[in-house]
Amino acid sequence: MVELGEVQVAAYLSERKPMGRFFFRNGLPSVVAFPSGCKTSDCLIRFEGELSVDAVIDWFAMAVLNLPRIFYYSKESLGPRFLAKSSPHKVKVIFFSKTGERATPAIRQAARDYWNYATFACVLWREEEFSVWWNTFGVESAPAVVFLKDPGLKPLVYHGSVNDSWFLDVLEQNKQQELPQLRSLTSEELGCDARGYSRAGRDTLTWYCAILAGRLGPELDSMRETMRRVQETLSKSSELKAASEDEHSITAAVALKSKRLTLSWLDGETQKNYCFFYLNIESSYETCGPRRVPTDVPRLFIIRYERNATEDTFKVDKKAKSIWEFYQQEVDPAAQLSVTYNGSAEVSRIIQWMSNIIEDGDSRKLPFYRVKTPELVPEDAEPFWSRGPQGLLSKSMGTKEKIQRTIIRIYDYLGDPRIGPALLLGALMSFGSIWLMRTQQNRSVQSSQPSQADNGDKLKPRERCRERNASKRNLPPSITDFEPKDSYQMPLSDSD
């Protein structure tokens, strides 16, 4: 806060008219902000709206902190405009509010930090819509926060006021789906990257990643639910021992608990190159790439990663002598072997199959085969508010500010007392230049008139001759013009 008595600081933060006079356009109090990287008064941002708590907070979050805005949805628009348009791999976070106030800057900061994992929305709570929200999400009253994760999974509901620190902790715990998706952002975090390491640590040389691949649809949703039950069963070792008669099934549970095994799902349509690379079979078009057949068949495969400790310790940079050696140097550091599951969708069968693969991969000496794995395609475009405070905030806001600034500048110049004499001087100079050009043209015309008159006098006799000849030529024939054949000269007498 700056008192108006601090003349130097107040003058530095005020605006200037064209004549240099200091003023505050909207009066006092006036709110200004220096964005990140701004060190002079030329780049500061001024609040020009109505001084209310909601307006100032929204201006501060959007223009200064460059945070996204969390919109409100009704019961009719929440489904088609939010749930249907959100990315399938993101967690949906819905805030229920009684007052309809905007989200706090802390929550909007969390929406910006977790935009790769979650998308946010707000709903105004009305008592007459209680049955809708209770049947849909299980919300009894507001305020409340709802987390929507995997399709078919029960929503996670928290009732009561939202504390910023508590919300950040809950968001960190629930930022991933129960069965996480394999993406370019999460591949190293999940340990499903041949260029990375296992979740168990860099010392782990052999680890596994079970991936469910398929196109988005009811078939993939059903299989994802099956894989979630597999993950839940493996997480509960006591239930697994009671439900399974084969002791070898415990191998997958131990690997999952020690973070040597990861379960995830893959969008086969978006990540078609990655999907075709591992499912190189004749019927892979039913799982990978764009939809070409009427039926979609999700497939489960497991990848065994292995690192060579000696090669990681001793790395020698050698220049490639040929293109074949260069290609061999570009392979991933971890060896890979993949196996596709061809059994039924029963939980026990899948667990038994994964346990056999892990036990076989840990006990046998398998070939150390390395290859270059296709890159995972980023599935989310860069948001407009991720370009920094000086970048594009939003199309509507940027256009509106430019128009307002142009109108304000024109208005300031019109109020300048020097604009009248300047316009008068410009008008006089314009009229003077027009008058000078016209006088020069008149003088050139008058100087060329005498020569034209002399030439006219010299040509008058010729013109008269031409007129006479033309008149004679145009006369009709007469009797005296012709001499008859039998005519003769009559003799005259002397008296005549």
Image (spheres, grey):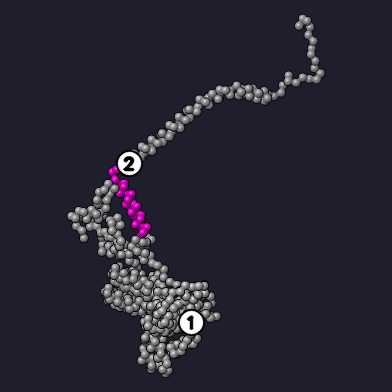
Q: Position of residue 265 (x, y in %)?
A: 43, 79
The amino acid at mark 2 is Ala
The mark tally for this picture is 2
Q: Residue furthest left?
A: 5
Q: Position of residue 63 (x, y in %)?
A: 31, 62
Asked whether 131 or 441 is in front, the reply is 441
- The N terminus, quarter of image: bottom left
Q: Residue at x 69, y 24 (%)?
A: 476
- The C terminus, quarter of image: top right
Give left or right: position of 28 versus 370. Answer: left
Q: Residue furthest right?
A: 486
Give left or right: position of 294 versus 110. Answer: right
Of tags 1 and 2, the one toward the viewer is: 1
- Classify 10 Å Cα crowding around label 1: few (below 14), some (14-19), many (20 and above): few
Q: Residue under circle 2?
A: 422
Location of residue 64 by image quarter: bottom left
Asked whether 137 or 228 is in front, the reply is 228
Specify start and end residues of the magenta stretch as a single range: 397-421
The answer to whether residue 65 is visible is yes
Is residue 229 one of those drawn in magenta?
no
Q: Earlier in the sequence, mark 1 or mark 2?
A: 1
The correct choice, above or below, for 134 with respect to 346 in the image is: above
Q: Secondary structure at mark 1?
A: loop
- Classify 10 Å Cα crowding around label 2: few (below 14), some (14-19), many (20 and above): few
Q: Which mark is residue 429?
A: none
Q: Which mark is residue 369?
A: 1
